[in-house]
Image: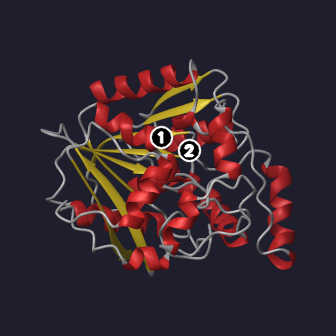
Amino acid sequence: MDLLKDFNAVDPSPVIRRPDYSALRKQLPALDFACDQPLPESVIAYRNFYRLNFAEAVGTGIGTFRAAGFELVAQYWLRENPKGTLVICHGYFDHTGIYGAAVRYGLERGYNVVIFDFPGHGLSSGEPVAIDTFLQYRETLEALLRKARGKMPEPWHGMGQSTGGAALLSYLQFSDWQPFDKVMLLAPLVRPARWHLRKWMFYLGRYLMPHPNRGFNINTHDAEFARRQALRDPLQSPVMSIRWLAAMVDWLKVFPKTARNRKKILVVQGTDDGTVDWRYNMRVIRDRFPNSKRVIVRGARHQMINETQPYRQQIIAALDNWLAQ
């Protein structure tokens, strides 16, 4: 099948475009969490490529749902006698395929795990890595949660990396229905690093360069992960989106003005994070969420869920302590 070529290829040359997986999406059932249909051959190849097969799971599934004008792809893994459900929100440029460590974390602790690809990411539809407003992340997340309502066991916990953390913050601030018990944010995005320089790229680029080259930063100490992400991942976009930057600028203006929220949340941040302005972000999140708990991991980089030891040990310990409270 032609659909398998991107996942079976071993050519180490850089990806030059984001493939269109609309044909793969058409093979998928509507998301229902029933776990009663065999996985298509193309999905098996995809999961083998990204190592998304977990011995801890007693069942698994994949399906599509619509929200905010997009057709989105969600995946889930089930445990026997689950303690609850962990919902994972990935970061910008990321997708389900590189979050195997996060899925395994939830399964090993006895939780069912649900994750979906944001618009323009992974297997979901949309212009590559583009969005009109961060509220669309909130809207798509809420649609997923409503699909899971009554089908996935409570309590529900949320984990968000970077832009996924912003999606959870947006959900907590703007949604009437609040199903999450524990919320865990890893290097959440409010303002990017070196914003005083990057903002000029946005203001000039929106007229001259709608899709500037992305570049691949070394955002984890795991060199093999970084190489695989930059050179062998067909779902990575080689460009970024000025539309997304415009949405991020709006988020940067809106979030610090939102109402104070008394909910207790966990924020885990590394000091060698060159992607987000973590000092500013920690301050503004603490201002909006005065009951938040902050954990600083010395030397950790941005891609926290894919960090190496000893950083990973500290990150996992912070997550475990938060879930145990």
Q: Which mark is residue 185?
A: 1
Q: Does the rendering let one see residue 325?
A: no
Compute the Cα span from label 1 to label 2.
6 Å
Dividing the picture into quadrants, the one containing residue 67 is bottom left
From the viewer's perspective, tell me whether residue 185 is left or right of residue 243.
left
Looking at the image, residue 120 sits to the left or right of residue 202; the answer is: left
Return the residue found at the far front: 1
x, y (%) of residue 302? 63, 38
Up-down: is 146 above or below 289?
below
User: Residue most toward the top?
Assistant: 310
In this rendering, the answer to whether 305 lies above or below 75 is above
Q: Residue at x 70, y 50 (%)?
A: 230
Dot 2, crowdedness within 10 Å: few (<14), some or many (≥20)? many
Whether label 1 touches label 2, CB < 8 Å: yes
149 left or right of 228 in image: left
Q: Which residue is mark 2?
A: 188
Q: Quadrant of the C terminus?
A: top left
Kindly identify the amino acid type of the residue bearing the numbered disc 2. Pro
- Residue at point 27% right, 60% down? 177
Residue 3 vs residue 85, the one in the foreground: 3
Spot occupied by residue 159 in the image (x, y as percentages of width and height): 41, 43
Element on which disc 1 rests: strand
185 with respect to 27 (left or right):
right
Image quadrant where residue 250 sits: bottom right
